[in-house]
Amino acid sequence: MEQLEFRFLGFPEFHLNGRRVELALRKAAALLIYLAEASGPVAREVAATLLWPETDEQAARARLRRTLHKIRIAFGREIIAAKGDALSLHPALTAELDTRVFEHACDSGSLDEAAGIYRDDYLAGFSLPDCPQFEEWVFFRRETLRGRLVQALERLVEAKIAGGEPRGAVVHATRLTALDPLSESAHRHLIRAHLATGDKAAAERQIETCIRLLRDELGVAPDPATLAMLRGPVQDAALEVPRTRYVAVGGIHIAYQIVGKGPVDIVLVPGFISHVERIWEDPSCRAWLTAVSRLGRLILFDRRGMGLSDRVGARPTVEATAQDILAVMDAAGSRRALLVGASEGGPGCIRFAVDHPDRLSGLVLWGSLAKGSRAADYPYALTVAQYDLWKQRLLAGWGGPAEIETFAPSLGDDRQARIWWAGLLRAASSPGAVAGLLEALRDADVRHLLAKVSAPTIVVHRSGDRAVRIEAGRFLASRIPGARFIEVEGDDHWFWVGDRQLLLDSIGALARPR
């Protein structure tokens, strides 16, 4: 059987039986890339619209036919099969894609192999500016693969240090910092690797580099925990966080932690931003999480596309969040749990409550909402236009303490809080990656599910919440059968800031064994 080899990590290359094939026409290359990456046949109409979006249907199909002919001429044989009105790679050919080999290596734990395969970013230097849908698809695919590389390198650094190979850890950590020079998390990996080799001078130089880059490019200072890394093992012990574990959901790895013990499991479902390790670095957040872990066994996780979990090539839905909750509970051996849904995590909890009522002992919704944007019968959120403007403002400030005045106005002038929030944002996601998540949250709507929630429910909301209006919380409580509404004084959206006791009491009330 004849063999196709496609290299998409870097500028695309095409090979047939070891012979490199040149495709001078970029749209011919784009069509072949899209068909190779597709999980099944692609309709002619989809391919034509993707590559000739400004052309009428008849003309686009004619151009598609000419492009298929040019691909056939370049390869010297038919490599794209047409069945009915759909296109796919010819079934008589086998195809090897470096992207799939890379992902398989990540999935199988062959991380050294994965790091070696990733020679450059997906389709680096290749673009079709006049095809926005294709460009968007490439963007999400690139973010997914780049995110998997970052995670592979992070795990390699940890494994090399634990295995007594600190110099190998330095190599991988150096690559991490090159991928994202403004990632404080990457710098910390390299500092830790240098310290593991015994090269304190190199660790000091790396801290100086980190300080300079964050100051000059972002106007912020490193987290105090980063500066504390040189002070020795006693201080490092104070910074320890629970072990991060991973569970696979359809090939996507979800990061989670388990903290504390107790007869009741409590699953915290985060809002749009999370990072299961960085959240422990804020003293107030750490104190709140510790307090909850005394009420039961606390299970934390990063939803897909966020924090330490895998990046994904599509906008995550509430259904996907519900799947992540189920997978994490199963991995943690949790038969039933109390869900605590914070902000945008609430809709995913509601979906889970309806789909898996037998796995739920109770539901607490904090600062949450049923719909991400305003409608005629739901005036409690921003309009789509207002939301998109807010999103642009948030992304424009990414790298600094973006929108902290909205999320935690009481901490707007708190320098330590601002530094921590800026670092959390940088570690949790990139502006490009989070844009799709925010759009998915904007379009989320679980109002039709509220009446189907059967679990004991408490809705807690701050009276002056600037991120999610209190009316959105009241709406939830009024539509969920038997739900209790608790109003908390204050303007902060974050649950660990300001008066935290009412939320803790609500969790405690539903966490008591019945």
Image (tube, grey):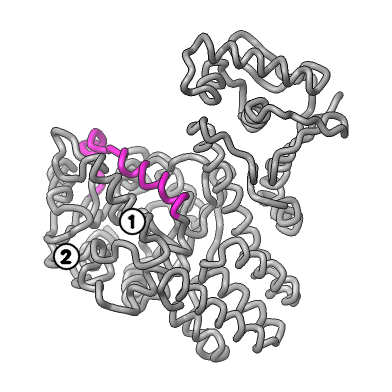
Residue placed most toward the observer, 50 or 339: 50
Amino acid type at circle 1 is Leu
Quadrant of res 320: top left
Residue at 52 percent of width and 30 percent of height:
131
Q: Which residue is mark 1?
A: 394
Check if residue 329 falls in the magenta segment: no
Residue placed most toward the observer, 11 or 115: 11
Residue placed most toward the observer, 124 or 142: 124
Quadrant where the N terminus is found in the figure: top right
Residue 153 marker: none
Residue at 19 percent of width and 54 percent of height:
459
Quadrant where the C terminus is found in the figure: bottom left
Question: Which residue range is magenta in the image?
Answer: 431-456
Could you tell me how far apart the alpha carbons at marks 2 and 1 are, in whole angstroms?
19 Å
Amino acid type at circle 2 is Asp
Residue 8 in sight in this render: yes
Residue at 14 percent of width and 33 percent of height:
376
Above or below 203: residue 499: above
Check if residue 450 falls in the magenta segment: yes
Quadrant of res 230: bottom right
Q: Earlier in the sequence, mark 2 or mark 1?
A: 1
Task: Determine crowd level at label 2: few under 14, some 14-19, many 20+ residues with C-alpha closer than 10 A.
Answer: many
Task: Determine crowd level at label 1: few under 14, some 14-19, many 20+ residues with C-alpha closer than 10 A.
Answer: some
Q: Position of residue 95 (x, y in %)?
A: 76, 31
Q: Nearer the viewer, mark 2 or mark 1?
A: 1
Magenta stretch secondary structure, dominant: helix
Q: Position of residue 220 (x, y in %)?
A: 41, 74
Q: Which residue is mark 2?
A: 491
